Amino acid sequence: MINQIFLRPVVSTAIKVAIVVGTILALINHGPALLALELSRQQIVQIALTYLVPYGVSTYSSVKMLQTQPKPGD
């Protein structure tokens, strides 16, 4: 499983999902502060987590899908 986490297609897809979903969620949750460029340290940490969560979910779902695929020779 650990090897699959670092496969290029898994990482690439997870980054794309994190950028799209993370940006939407960051704007929803912190829009006024982002537009005013008035972010507290706590908000910056929250925004970072807002990007990490969809990255983790996408990675998890991709790896689970890969694990259900038949192995060559099976």
Image (cartoon, grey):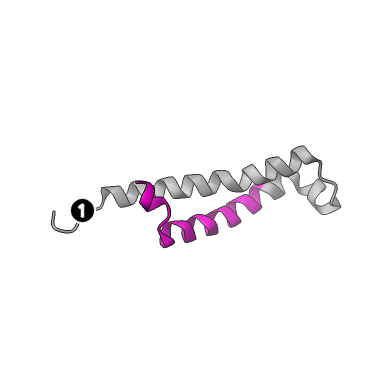
Residue 36 horizontal/vertical position (percent)? 86, 51
Most common secondary structure along the magenta stretch:
helix
* 48 over 14 or under it: above or below: above
* 60 over 71 or under it: above or below: above
Left or right of 27 in this view: 71: left
Left or right of 66 in this view: 48: right
- The residue depicted at 56 percent of the width and 43 percent of the height is 53
Kind of element beneath mark 1: loop
| Residue stretch rendered in magenta on the structure | 1-25
Q: Which residue lies furthest to the top in this view?
A: 42
- The residue depicted at 42 percent of the width and 45 percent of the height is 60
- The residue depicted at 75 percent of the width and 41 percent of the height is 43
Residue 44 horizontal/vertical position (percent)? 74, 44
Residue 34 horizontal/vertical position (percent)? 79, 50
Is residue 26 rendered magenta in the image? no
- Residue 41 lies in what quarter of the image? top right
Is residue 12 rendered magenta in the image? yes
Left or right of 64 in this view: 52: right
- The residue depicted at 18 percent of the width and 58 percent of the height is 72
Residue 50 horizontal/vertical position (percent)? 63, 44
Please name the residue that numbered disc 1 is placed on: 70
Residue type at numbered disc 1: Pro
